[in-house]
Image (tube, coloured by chain):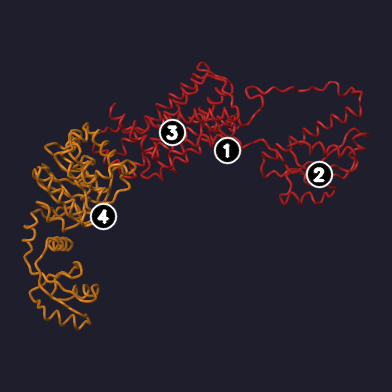
Amino acid sequence: MIRVNQVSKRYGAIEALRQVSFEVNPGEIFGLIGPDGAGKTTLFRILTTLLLPDEGTARVNGRDVVANYKALRAEIGYMPGRFSLYQDLTIAENLAFFATIFGTTIEANYENIRPIYEQLAPFKDRRAGKLSGGMKQKLALCCALIHSPEVLFLDEPTTGVDPVSRKEFWDILAMLKQKGMTILVSTPYMDEATRCNRVGLIQNGELLQIDTPAGIVSRFDQPLWAVTSDEMYRLIQDLRTHPTIKTAYAFGDTVHITVKHSFYPEDLFADLGAKNHQNIEIFPITPTIEDCFIGLMETQKTP
Amino acid sequence: MRTIQLLLQKEFLQIIRNKAMLPIIFVMPIMQTMILAFAANYEINNLRLHIVDRDRSTFSRQLTQQLDASERFVVVYYDNAAHLAAQHMQADQTDMTLEIPIGFEKDLVSLQNTQVYLGANAINSVKAGVGMNYAASIIADYNMNIRLRAMPIVPAAQAGQIEIVPTEWFNPSRSYKNFFVPGILAVLITVIGSMLASLNIVREREIGTIEQINVTPIRKYQFIIGKLIPFWIIGLFDLALGLGFAKLVFGLPTTGNMMALFGFAGLFLLAILGFGLFLSTFSETQQQAMFISWFFMLVFLLMGGVFTPIESMPQWAQVLTWFNPVSYMVQVLRLVLLKGSGFMDLWPFFLKMTGFVIALNAFAVLNYRKTT
């Protein structure tokens, strides 16, 4: 459905994308996960015909994004990372505007957007600028779906949205997928990766790994420990300089560590105690997908 | 066509809801014609005059009365303290000083010749010059009366004097308002065409809505036309509003062919909208657009004959005004309103403005392509 082949893009001296290649199958939710500035938005803008790649080719729904951009625009739905609807128009007006642009009507496509629109309907005469973050996202999704696109591009749709609305949003995506929609979604939140069929980790313009969420976790082949004490910041510093520890990173209110063969929790406990850490706890944990990403990024930084 | 219609609908809806834009469109023409035409005024009245009367005679008092009676002057000091004159001027308590020397009356009667001293604060050169002229003409007038009264038999030397009977063509009352208001109206539609239109285009870029528009089948030209037409309509509407208001409130003459005037204004708006579009290609935010268009507006207006006549500019500046579309709009407004020109008289202006329309829009479209 989406086929990206060796796409590169540079802005001056900055390489935003480096020979990125991947495929998205029909009816799949494909997640692009990566930190800010990784190149996610650039990739989206190329795939939605807004930007020309410097090198490589990309096809969406069988059409080349450069040569066939006009026809393609009617077949894709795009929700930019920034809220891009008219804030001074109401929900109903925004929706009617985008429906008419695509030569259709709200009524003709009501089935597509019904589950989302029903939540918005009580506020349909409210101006878009006055909506909450979650409502804005739903309206933007409605507008992106109003012309029954084949492929949906969602650039960080849940950034700045509260956890409940995020969950609702992903439930909607799951429902769209069931109807056969192909969805490419990017997010900086790694916990959202588990809701995708496959995910690609992108960093510094390069795709590091593509797999199912379970596949990525199973590749994490070393023991993982969590450490806590009363002084998080000093704890990380001390753990990073400890000779038996490979990596240490903050994970919520604990520090996750990967370790060398010489590691013994009792020794670490004693060493940390000697450095005046209070309430020390060290326990083994099973890695989550987030640990895998952080691990991958760490190895990427120090090759 | 349907797409453009939809875009226009959306655009007007947004303009109506824009709390800043709507008052500008309706209030600006009225405010500008009212306030600027009444307040910005080159007719100088109430100049503060210090008369140092060292003669203290009947003649000197008569001259003083005549000056004081004129609405141009207010005599704020009347004494014989010459040493205070400079102090008053220094402290900005007076604008002008008239010193009548000792023996003024005697010399005038016996020698038929005397001198008075006239000084003016020339920081504001226009004010000083106008004040000097007023005072000189009042004194000359007084002089004539004295002669007639003192010497009922006109001496031989006076017989051959030429009296000038002036007629002010096209603006008989020499009203500054009649000169100024057409200029203000030109400013008004220039602001709408260049500033408001370019701000409106840049707004979509700044807010990010252009991203969503760009992935739709809307073509670029449709988007641009949809953006510019509203301001073309608003510009003409505001011109009519301002004209009607000026006519009602202070009887601005509308001598010429109004069809020709609005025809030309429509053409001018096309040119200036092209310029607005051109400006929009240089800005990412409305603030940048504002600064850039403000800079060009100032040059256009100062070099457009709105405030000062182009004819009194140096030659090089006059050449520059040939490339300023605003100057043609100002001229056509004055020609039609005051002089009564019609299509036949204005065809060279129409021709030139068509050139501007083509050049500015071609420029804008070429540059717009490069940016997005």
Which residue type does callout 3 highlight? Gly
Mark number, residue B51: 2
> Looking at the picture, do discs 2 and 3 lie on one chain?
yes
Q: Quadrant of residue A50?
A: top left
- The quadrant of the rendering that contains the C terminus of chain A is bottom left
Residue behind mark 4:
A160
Judging by the rendered image, the residue that carries numbered circle 1 is B35
Relative horizontal placement of residue B205, taking residue B342 as reference (left or right): left
Amino acid marked by disc 1: Ile
> What whole-number distance in Å separates the C-alpha atoms at marks 4 and 2?
76 Å
* Residue under the point 50% across and 17% down: B343
**Same chain assignment for discs 4 and 3:** no
Q: How would you rate the neighbour count of disc 4 (Cα within 10 Å): few for under 14, some for 14-19, many for 20 or more?
A: few
Residue B331 visible in image:
yes
Chain rendered orange: A
N-terminal-most mark, 1 or 2 = 1
Q: Chain of mark 3?
A: B
Q: Amino acid at mark 4?
A: Gly
Residue B299 percent location from the top left of the image:
51, 37
- The colour chain B appears in is red
Pick the front one: A107 or A237: A107
Q: Chain of mark 2?
A: B
Task: Report the residue at 32% width, 39% height from top.
Answer: B371
Q: Which one is closest to the eye, mark 4 or mark 2?
A: 4
Nearer to me, B360 or B73: B73
- Location of mark 3 (residue): B193
User: Horizontal placement of A216 versus B64: left or right?
Assistant: left
